[in-house]
Amino acid sequence: MNLPIPESLRPVLTFVHPTLMWVTLGVMLYAGYLGMQVRKLRLAKGEEKKALQEEAGGTLKTLKDKHFVTGSLLLIGLVMGSIGGMAVTYINNNKLFVGPHLLVGLSVVALATLSAGLVPWMQKGKEWARLTHISLNTLLVSFFLWQAATGVQIVQRILESMSKAS
């Protein structure tokens, strides 16, 4: 299948995925920071809780809402970025390259989906769901950082082939 994409647009499409993924990494780290703030505030008592609320700039509900919205944006970025990366690879090469970058990328999407799926139980106060959510997200960040490193290698190869072609 050969999609009629103008040649002038192909290089732009090629770099949408890596750019989106670096933005997503920033969102991921911010969501993790907010999650740690929520947990710290949830476990605090009395004066310590008041001091943490002032330091964090909001109540537990405010921080939970920010964490929830940021996590939702993260899930959107991961899913759409992964689909987009596979689509651009297929458009440019008429095939997908099944290797570690693709497989770990799909694992990242699966981990994020599982993590988000725990929200109803966390809202009901289930500590097992919170601990599983934290564990899955720790693994997710580790996989994503490895994914970013392999992505940089792929971008370098693309840039080299583009410079040879011109």
Image (spheres, rainbow, N blue to C red):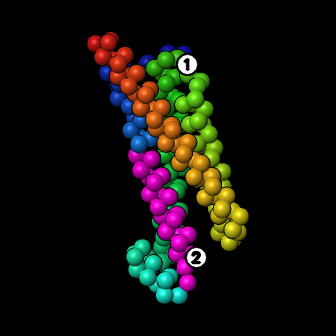
Looking at the image, residue 38 lies above or below residue 103 = below
Q: 85 above or below 31? A: above
Secondary structure, mark 2, is helix
Q: Residue at x 54, y 45 (%)?
A: 142
| Amino acid under disc 2 | Leu
Q: Is residue 80 above or below residue 41?
A: above
Q: Which residue is mark 1?
A: 95
Which residue is situated farthest in the bottom direction here? 46
Q: Is residue 136 covered in magenta?
A: no
Residue 156, located in which quarter of the rendered image? top left
- The answer for how far apart the CA atoms under marks 2 and 1 are is 50 Å
| Residue 20, x across and y down, in percent | 42, 41
- Name which residue type carries label 1: Lys
Q: Earlier in the sequence, mark 2 or mark 1?
A: 2
Residue 131 appears anywhere in the view? yes
Label number found at residue 124 = none
The N terminus, quarter of image: top right
Whether residue 120 is visible? no
Q: Which residues are magenta?
A: 23-45
Mark 2 crowd level (few <14, some 14–19, many ≥20, 10 Å Cα): few
